[in-house]
Image: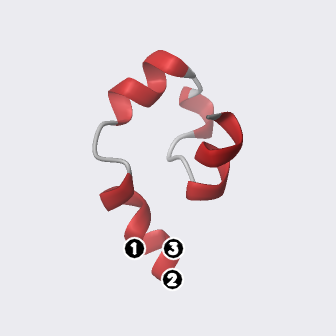
Amino acid sequence: MATDQHFPIRIQKPHQLQALHPLPAQFPYRPETIQSQL
């Protein structure tokens, strides 16, 4: 639950992540997924 609550705060600019890794099907991103992609 803590991870789910922190994920929207951690991703303050989802459009930048989409620009880097356009994965609209995987939205919303999860913190572990972001670290893997980035």
Left/right of residue 37 with respect to residue 16 in the rendered view: right
Labelled disc at residue 3? 3
Give the amino acid at mark 1: Gln
Q: Quadrant of residue 38?
A: top right
Residue 34, image x, y percentages:
59, 44
| Residue 5 horizontal/vertical position (percent) | 39, 73
Q: CA distance from mark 1 to mark 2?
A: 6 Å
Front residue of 36/4: it is 36
Q: Amino acid at mark 2?
A: Met
**Residue in the picture at 65% in, 56% down:** 32
Please give the residue where the numbered disc 1 appears in the rendered image.
Answer: 5
Quick check: marks 1 and 2 in contact, CB under 8 Å?
A: yes
Can you say whether 21 is above or below 30 in the image? above
Residue at horizontal 31 percent and vertical 60 percent from the top: 9
Q: Are marks 2 and 3 in contact (CB under 8 Å)?
A: yes
Residue highlighted by disc 2:
1
